[in-house]
Image (cartoon, rainbow, N blue to C red):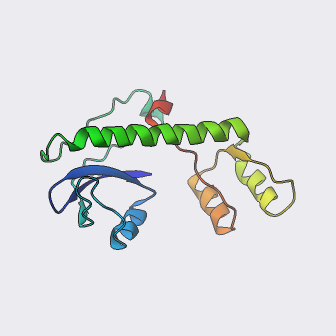
Amino acid sequence: MIRYNLRCEKGHAFESWFQSSAAYETQEKRRLVSCPNCGSVKVERAIMAPQIVSRKGREQAAPTPAAPAEATGSESTPLLMAQERELRAKLKELRDHIVKNADNVGERFPNEARKMHYGDIEHRPIYGEATPDEARALIDEGVEVSPLPVLPDDRN
């Protein structure tokens, strides 16, 4: 997932999450990205500083605040914060449901998913670990997989 700071033609600043940069570009071309304040679909990415943290440094790194966009009025911030909290709550609920109702197969996930896909073992809900290359290979084979949402609170 990637988060973009966005700005509409009227100068409203907001942020949104996308599966990838290509997904953002596709949605923007199809006019599916719109300003939550005014509904304008003339949206562009705002300048933002990337935050890169190594896997080892996640525990030690303090989050750096994003560079503030131009002031657009205080009415947009509470709305975005409420939407972000609601989205995070829904993602946490989804993840908790999966963890509660599926078997954690850990690093065996790619093999187990393949076996189910090809009918070698009975289908059941599973989750586990896969590298990006393993996940891509599964998708290329037609195996339906989705990443579990990772939330900032999970990095403790």
Residue 104: x and y in percent read: 72, 39
Give the left or right position of residue 83, taking residue 56 as reference: left
Is residue 66 among the parts visible in the rendering? no
Give the quadrant of residue 66: top left
Q: Could you tell me which residue is drawn at 74 percent across and 46 percent down?
A: 108
Q: Could you tell me which residue is drawn at 86 percent across and 53 percent down?
A: 122
- Front residue (pair 55, 124): 124
> Furthest residue to the bottom?
29
Give the left or right position of residue 140, taking residue 47 as reference: right
Residue 116: x and y in percent read: 80, 57
Q: Could you tell me which residue is drawn at 43 percent across and 59 percent down?
A: 20
Residue 144: x and y in percent read: 67, 60
Is residue 138 among the parts visible in the rendering? yes
Q: Could you tell me which residue is drawn at 53 percent across and 44 percent down?
A: 149
Q: Is residue 128 above or below residue 144?
A: above
Number of residue marks = 0
Q: Is residue 99 above or below residue 13?
A: above
- Front residue (pair 61, 87): 87
Give the quadrant of residue 97: top right
- Front residue (pair 2, 43): 43
